[in-house]
Amino acid sequence: MSASGFLPNIETPIRRRLRRVGAKTEPFASRSLAVGKQAPSLLSGRVGAVRIDEITSQRDALRSASAVLSQLLRGVDDAIILLSKEFHSAAFSIYETAKRFGPALGLDEQLKELTALRKQARKKTTPPASGTPAPAGAPEPAKV
């Protein structure tokens, strides 16, 4: 179970396998369940008409919730991007002012530190050569 207590937490290999059951097989699954409801003798004791209705209802409700949460997460990500832009703009403004007036204010050491940090941030990082594993925690490169 996940931290929420009622949502499952599927391990990645199993998730990949289960994801194959999706949109392509949806028409088959929907029609098969409808046939099962029309002819209850086809249903096993484990999956009756009531359970089919429960599964369908729960899945549809979770899909709706997922769509709403995806939109909300997109908005949160956009807000973080905009705030980060403002955060960095304010920092750069302070840095530029410090370059002009910092020495007169006795901020030589702080200015040296800021300049070094800025140079370090501006360095372009080269991606690892093909076949070289990325560092732990690094995102996987996009496959084209």
Image: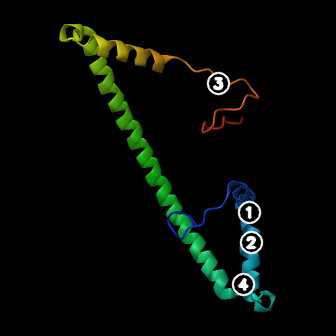
Q: Quadrant of the C terminus?
A: top right
Query: In x, y percent, where is residue 138?
Result: 61, 36
Marks counted in the figure total 4
Q: Quadrant of residue 88?
A: top left
Which badge, 4 or 1, is on the more N-terminal residue? Answer: 1
Q: Earlier in the sequence, mark 3 or mark 1?
A: 1
Does residue 52 sit above or below 69 in this rendering? below
Amino acid type assigned to the residue bearing label 4 in the image: Val
The first of marks 3 and 4 along the sequence is: 4
Estimate how packed mark 2 is, as few (under 14), some (14 to 19) or many (20 or more) residues with alpha carbons within 10 Å: some
Residue 8 image offset from top left, x and y in percent: 60, 66
Residue hosting label 3: 127
Look at 65% across and 84% down and name the residue there. Answer: 51
Distance from the alpha carbon under mark 2 to that under mark 1: 10 Å
For marks 2 and 4, the one nearer the N-term is 2
**Residue holding disc 2:** 29
Please give the residue where the numbered disc 4 appears in the rendered image. Answer: 47
Helix, strand or loop at disc 1?
A: loop
Asked if 65 appears above or below 56 in the picture, the reply is above
Name the residue nearer the viewer: 29 or 131: 131
Residue 118, disc: none
